[in-house]
Amino acid sequence: MSAARAPPDATIERLRRRIEQVDRSLVGLYADRRALVLELWEYKHRRGLSLEDRSQEALIGQRARRWAVEESVDPAEVERWILTTVADCKRAAQAAVERGAPRPARC
């Protein structure tokens, strides 16, 4: 048995639309980040530099934690989220570099 659908609530709908806008912005920012990571990896690849930089990744995590505190958000949660994003971008960039694929404007 399914619960009856509640009538539309203007506040709920307004908040859902705002969440949707934020989600859309996050997707755009993620695409921007992936494109920048790919550009960086291509640069390093052409110069024979190491593609990984664990010290930089540690700094990214530290910055994320600091920004989380400033925004009153759980630092561990934000660090996990950003480092997952870093790992996803890194995998995508590495795969593109290894394929020799031309870099799209946005990954």
Image: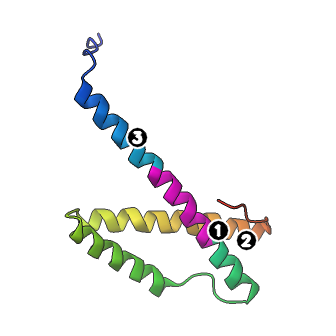
Magenta region, residue range: 25-37
Locate the N terminus by quadrant: top left
Q: Residues within 10 Å of mark 2 (few under 14, many from 20)?
A: some
Q: Quadrant of residue 58?
A: bottom left
The reply to whether dot 2 and dot 1 touch (C-beta < 8 Å) is yes
Q: Residues within 10 Å of mark 3 (few under 14, many from 20)?
A: few
Q: Residue at x 41, y 44 (%)?
A: 21
Q: Secondary structure at mark 2?
A: helix
Q: Residue at x 31, y 29 (%)?
A: 13
13 shown above or below 31:
above
Q: Which residue is mark 2?
A: 97
Q: Which residue is mark 3?
A: 20
Q: Amino acid at mark 3?
A: Glu
The reply to whether dot 3 and dot 1 touch (C-beta < 8 Å) is no
Q: Which residue is mark 1?
A: 93
Q: CA distance from mark 2 to mark 1?
A: 6 Å
Q: Secondary structure at mark 3?
A: helix
Q: Secondary structure at mark 1?
A: helix
Q: Quadrant of residue 42?
A: bottom right
Locate the C terminus by quadrant: bottom right
Q: Residue at x 67, y 89 (%)?
A: 49
Q: CA distance from mark 2 to mark 3?
A: 33 Å
